[in-house]
């Protein structure tokens, strides 16, 4: 036997064996997942493998249409969106297929100039109004996929910050009549998008621009927003089904409209998600990347969420991904009670931005500070073709070196990490990694026995905010009578046991408006007196 055909034997490092044994790769998607830098051994792995038997059963029931959001008695159907054939009935399948086709046809007509504004002009801009998952998904799509001069220009209003709304109106002032106003609200009653929409609408109608012929609603059929858009004959209404949660709405009309308006292929996006969904239905943990990912979260935080997730994508266009994962993971997993009613205070905190820029800001603590995290590195292997770097340092190699160096430096201090690598980044692979994390969240929730699909904390916050907003009007009504009243008198008239809320309301009312006179010292609340200014 020639020397070239001999098997080369060497002493394999233990770390290399673990890396090789737990490295996952899919040739079709060209995606790798490495969990070898998470602290677990073979015995730990076998224990979690046994727990996955029930996890798989739960996910099977979810996809078949079980009521998974029990607080709202809703199915959870985001997996059906990218493969309507697994829908629980023909009606849902037809709704999905029709909506995808409708979005694709609408966007093609926009790009071809077959849908014009009332002045006969093509649309050039989009002002997207939504909050939470209604904006984070589209923002991720635009930031990560849109190429310069491809499709429509996007701006986002994802908050009711008055300066944000003002700045966006200034930003699109020259193209207001050529702007599509997309309002996203599943229920149609969420205050933030409603308030922003009303302000934007009044401002553009003051400039004699027709709102209805420029506006699109994405909402549930028969919601208040749906009825408004339908009665006023808005340009278009797209369906956001009851069984799609905001944090998993990116493969619904919410994400698909954004993708199609920047001339990316929605079918490629859905295909990438569908391929990953099928891969992650595998009942073999070692060949299922979502099972491996969720198991690594479980090992790192000992099933109790003891470690935060620091997301470090090594490309600028994925810098929004950490914010996207923040909502998906924290809203799904941050729960006070488990399914049996026990108080568990579960969750995984997520933060991060991009490498290598932002690691200059906090890698010092990650390596040498408190050990309360694991890193999630995201590596891309592609690079643009239009850079002449002959004889110069290759920026892609530099980024790769920085990633590997940081990963090694953390490992040397027993700091844990996970690495996801994509051969290239495109619309299909974005769909795939979204689906990977969605399934990992679902798996992890089953491992720790919580419901990933309700959000009682969010609902409690909305309820408390609504109560404060009602109090704002009560405070205004009392002061607007014209009497000069001190702080204690106002609290007494409201019969309110929580004067802090009243203080916050009064402070908010009395600044930046010439409506009320204030006398006294703001650092001594009970010294304050308030009176409405006579504007006549």
Image (spheres, rainbow, N blue to C red):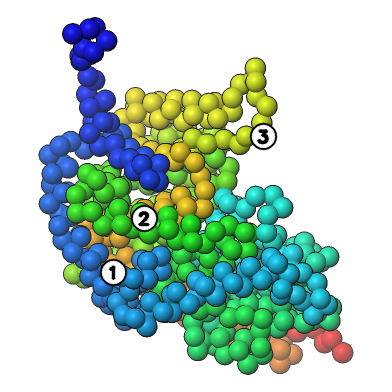
Q: Is residue 468 left or right of residue 47?
A: right
The residue under label 2 is 275
Q: Position of residue 510 (x, y in %)?
A: 71, 74
**Residue 439 or residue 206, whichever sits in front:** 439
Which image quarter: residue 16?
top left
The residue under label 1 is 63
Asked which secondary structure carries label 3, the reply is loop
Residue at 26% over, 57% down: 281
Q: Is residue 493 left or right of residue 429?
A: right
C-alpha span from label 3 to label 2:
31 Å
Instruction: Name which of mark 3 and mark 1 comes first in the sequence.
Output: 1
**Residue 348 or residue 137, whichever sits in front:** 137
Residue at 54% over, 51% down: 320
How busy is the neighbourhood of tag 1: few (under 14 within 10 Å), some, or many (20 plus)? some
How busy is the neighbourhood of tag 3: few (under 14 within 10 Å), some, or many (20 plus)? few
Q: Position of residue 256 (x, y in %)?
A: 53, 65
How busy is the neighbourhood of tag 2: few (under 14 within 10 Å), some, or many (20 plus)? many
């Amino acid at each position: 036997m020639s020397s070239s055909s001999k098997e080369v034997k060497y002493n394999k490092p233990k770390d290399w064996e673990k890396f090789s044994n737990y490295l996952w790769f899919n040739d079709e998607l060209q995606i790798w997942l490495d969990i070898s830098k998470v602290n677990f051994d073979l015995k730990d792995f076998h224990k979690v493998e046994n727990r996955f038997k029930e996890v798989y059963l739960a996910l099977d029931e979810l996809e078949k249409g079980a009521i998974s959001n029990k607080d709202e008695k809703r199915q959870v159907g985001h997996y059906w969106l990218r493969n309507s054939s697994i829908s629980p009935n023909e009606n849902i399948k037809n709704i999905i297929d029709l909506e995808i086709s409708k979005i694709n046809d609408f966007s093609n007509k926009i790009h071809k100039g077959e849908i014009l504004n009332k002045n006969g002009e093509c649309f050039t801009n989009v002002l997207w109004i939504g909050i939470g998952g209604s904006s984070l998904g589209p923002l991720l799509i635009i930031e990560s996929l849109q190429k310069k001069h491809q499709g429509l220009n996007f701006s986002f209003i994802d908050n009711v910050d008055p300066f944000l709304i003002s700045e966006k109106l200034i930003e699109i002032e020259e193209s207001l009549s050529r702007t599509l106003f997309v309002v996203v609200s599943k229920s149609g009653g969420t205050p933030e998008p409603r308030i922003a929409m009303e302000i934007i609408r009044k401002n553009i109608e003051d400039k004699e621009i027709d709102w209805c012929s420029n506006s699109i609603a994405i909402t549930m059929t028969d919601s208040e927003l749906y009825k408004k858009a339908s009665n006023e004959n808005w340009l278009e209404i797209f369906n956001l089904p009851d069984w799609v949660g905001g944090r998993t709405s990116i493969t619904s009309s919410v994400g698909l409209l954004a993708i199609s308006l920047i001339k990316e292929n929605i079918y490629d996006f859905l295909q990438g998600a569908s391929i990953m969904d099928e891969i992650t239905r595998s009942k073999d943990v070692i060949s299922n990347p979502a099972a491996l990912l969720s198991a690594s979260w479980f090992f790192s935080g000992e099933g109790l969420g003891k470690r935060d997730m620091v997301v470090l994508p090594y490309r600028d266009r994925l810098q929004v991904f950490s914010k996207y994962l923040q909502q998906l993971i924290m809203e799904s997993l941050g729960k006070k009670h488990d399914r049996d009613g026990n108080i568990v205070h579960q969750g995984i905190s997520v933060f991060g931005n991009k490498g290598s820029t932002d690691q200059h800001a906090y890698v010092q603590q990650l390596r040498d500070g408190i050990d309360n995290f694991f890193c999630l590195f995201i590596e891309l292997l592609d690079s643009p073709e239009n850079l002449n770097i002959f004889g110069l340092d290759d920026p892609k190699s530099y980024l790769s070196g920085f990633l590997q160096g940081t990963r090694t430096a953390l490992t040397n201090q027993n700091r844990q990490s996970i690495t996801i690598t994509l051969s290239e980044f495109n619309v299909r692979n974005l769909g795939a990694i979204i689906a990977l994390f969605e399934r990992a969240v679902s798996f992890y929730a089953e491992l720790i026995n919580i419901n990933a699909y309700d959000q009682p904390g969010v609902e409690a916050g909305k309820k408390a905010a609504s109560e404060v907003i009602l109090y704002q009007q009560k405070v205004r009504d009392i002061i607007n009578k014209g009497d000069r009243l001190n702080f204690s008198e106002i609290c007494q008239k409201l019969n309110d046991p929580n004067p802090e809320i009243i203080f916050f309301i009064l402070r908010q009312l009395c600044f930046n408006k010439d409506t009320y006179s204030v006398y006294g010292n703001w650092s001594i609340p009970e010294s304050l007196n308030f009176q409405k200014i006579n504007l006549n």
